[in-house]
Amino acid sequence: MFARENKLTAWHLGVAMIALFIGGFFGPLQKLEYVGVNLYSTLNKIGIASYYQGLTLHAVLNALVWTTFFIVGFFTFTITRSLNKELTMPKLNAVGLITMIIGLIMAAIPILMNLATVLFTFYPPMKANPFFYIGLVLVVVGSWICGWGFYLTYFAWRKENPGVQTPIIALGSLITMVLWQIATLGVATELLVMVIPWSFGLVEGIDPQLARTFFWFTGHPLVYFWLLPAYVSWYGMMPKQAGGKLFSEPLARLVFWLFLALSVPVGLHHQYLDPGVPAGWKFLHGLLTYSLFLPSMLTAFNVVASLEIGGRNNGGTGLLGWVRALPWGDPSYAAQNLAMILFVFGGIGGLTNSSYNLNLVIHNTSWVPGHFHLTVGSAVTLTFFGILYWLVPKLSGKPLWNRKVALVQAWTWFAGMLLMGNGLHILGLNFGVPRRTMVGVAAYASDAWNPMLIEAAIGGIILGISGLLFYSNMIGTVLSKKRLEAPIEMPVAEAYDEHPAPAWLDNWKPWLAITVVLIVVAYGPILFDMIANANMTSPGFKVW
Amino acid sequence: MEKKKYKVPQGTVAIMIIFILLIIALWGSAYLTMLSRGVTITP
Amino acid sequence: MIHVDRSEKIYIIISVALIAVFFVAVAVSSFVYGIQVPLPESRVDPRTIATPAPGNFFGEPGLYEVGPGKYNAYIMSQIWSFTPREITVPVGSTVTFYVTSKDVQHGFRINETNVNMQIVPGEVSKLTVTFDEAREYDYICHEYCGVGHQTMAGKIIVTEQ
């Protein structure tokens, strides 16, 4: 059973890890550039034309490819195991995977040829080669197709199991996939209706303000698409790994539903400093973004309380003594717990970003990459590493090559991100150092920036080493001749509370209705207005 | 099994208190930075 | 309803109260006190906005005195520079910045002030600042705008009265 699912999962994870390897390679180089060590002239020899071409690779491969491929692969595993049901149409999921890979290759070629040095936001009227955009569309569409395969499987399971509550791992995974499907309508519209015809020269001009608005319709729920798979593990698996139980299973379900309903109608908080969006709409999205504070806070309590149950079951006592009784020697557990700690700071930074006029202080400064390296780069990526520390042995049937190396990897990632995150946050907050800029050669760079630039660079180098440790472990595992002595199963946390979740927490209809209503209310009038008054005046520019 | 051995997750409550204080401190410092930098509309 | 542990209930109430306080703090500082984000000012045609014409300040970007101690600064952004590159005002001046772009998106930020704007072709971004200290300020482009992005900046010189 599950042979095809395992194979699909392995393919997704493999592509994801290759993408992160290439994308991650540029990370330390960027931080070295900050302190005046410019290695890009050397890279010219292998065809990397500029810092910004490298940055485009870093962002597209890490933020879009690593995440999307990992998540779809992980869900192929979690949904089928959690429902204990094979995919009903595995061919559909294979078509999805192949579409994603074709899209990836199609987008990668223009980037590598320096025809799409537009970063991962590709803000028009910067104009890339059309195949870059088409490739991105195909990656997204391929992930949609995989999602349809999941829904069909779920419908079939539902029919066979009337009245049975959807297990939380499957429910969280499915909600995340639906969220992605709704969220990506924004960027799909931007690309298909506006950008691609314009990049082929079929239309003369584009409205950059409208394009930005479609982009950020997708851009914010995108971060929850990255984060919620980590939540699936934190809620559904980690309590088990810690020796505990899920403290409040119903509230965990509620959190996933709230993220579905609230993730999309908040995108304008990325455009607080845009000239073309009225105050009322910005402020409404600010309010809705603040409402996301609730599911985030619910998660903090619930996850920690679940771990406390584990720590106490393991013999920990006292107010905080149970923390030491958690399985810190298990790299899968340690990586994820460290990811959570970094997420504390990522979350507080996010609260700051969502706070309307506080954007005047931090918008487009190095604070922002500081922030998202603690969220997607740590809370998400380090959790994914933790998952891979059991999932790769599970899929390959071989034990993890070296547990000690894995532990050192988790701790060095933690230390590197802490240093880099702190440095970048302070540089942005105090000095307004711009993000996505060759700071090392900027005319306006100040000596006062140096201590934090150096701290960030040290963090970046530690992260590079940590990355190499991760890959040596993955390669070592796959190439190993050893076989697992006992099969590995997906860790599944039991509910601690005997009160079962009420039926409305297992019902899609009201939540989908709320989701659609909130999107229509928060985006309908302003988008209608912007489309009706579209300013299709900007020709394209190639500026690299 | 471990049911009702401890009614209140005390450690969690302690960690959440620290968490909330940290939120107030860090968000507050960004807010004060903004206030110190002056208004942006014509008085 | 969902069964919620008592300690968690109290925690939820505190969390909601906290975010409500933050919300009020943000609302008051922006809409009452006046630390406001850029709001729709006017729309322009990026293809012609740099062409000098009667009434088009962006055709001749620079500093315009509009009253005692009050100025409007019209700044044109293009790859990879601002026009003008330098502005001189006496200390205590209140300057309203109007910035637009004739090509790609840019950013405009005056360091150590609250002036920070996204510059989008076709739109005019506007914010005001009062310079209370005689010193120099950098204004820099914070949005990636091509390979020369890191060179795009200007200077405000605030002189003694």
Image (cartoon, grey):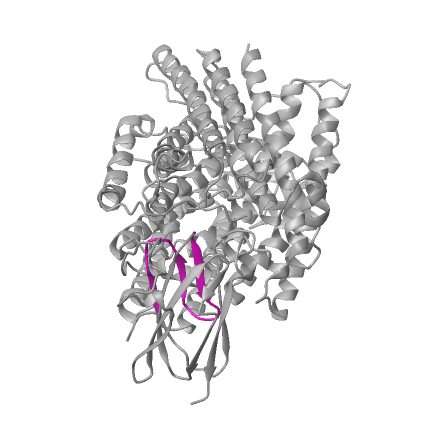
Q: Residue furthest bottom?
A: C161
Q: Is residue A86 visible?
A: no
Q: In which image quadrant can residue A254 be found? A: top left
- Left/right of residue A495 with respect to residue A464 in the rendered view: left
Picture quarter with the C terminus of chain C: bottom left
| Residue segment shown in magenta | C104-127
Q: Is residue A94 magenta?
A: no
Residue at x 39%, y 42% (from the top left corner): A215
Relative to the observer, which residue lies in front, A372 or A170?
A: A372
Residue at x 29%, y 60% (from the top left corner): C39
Residue C69: image x %, image y %? 33, 83
Residue A382: image x %, image y %? 59, 40
Q: Is residue C111 magenta?
A: yes
Residue at x 27%, y 65% (from the top left corner): C31
Depicted A209 relative to depicted C21: above or below: above
Relative to the observer, which residue lies in front, C123 or A232?
A: C123
Q: In which image quadrant can residue A37 be found? A: bottom right
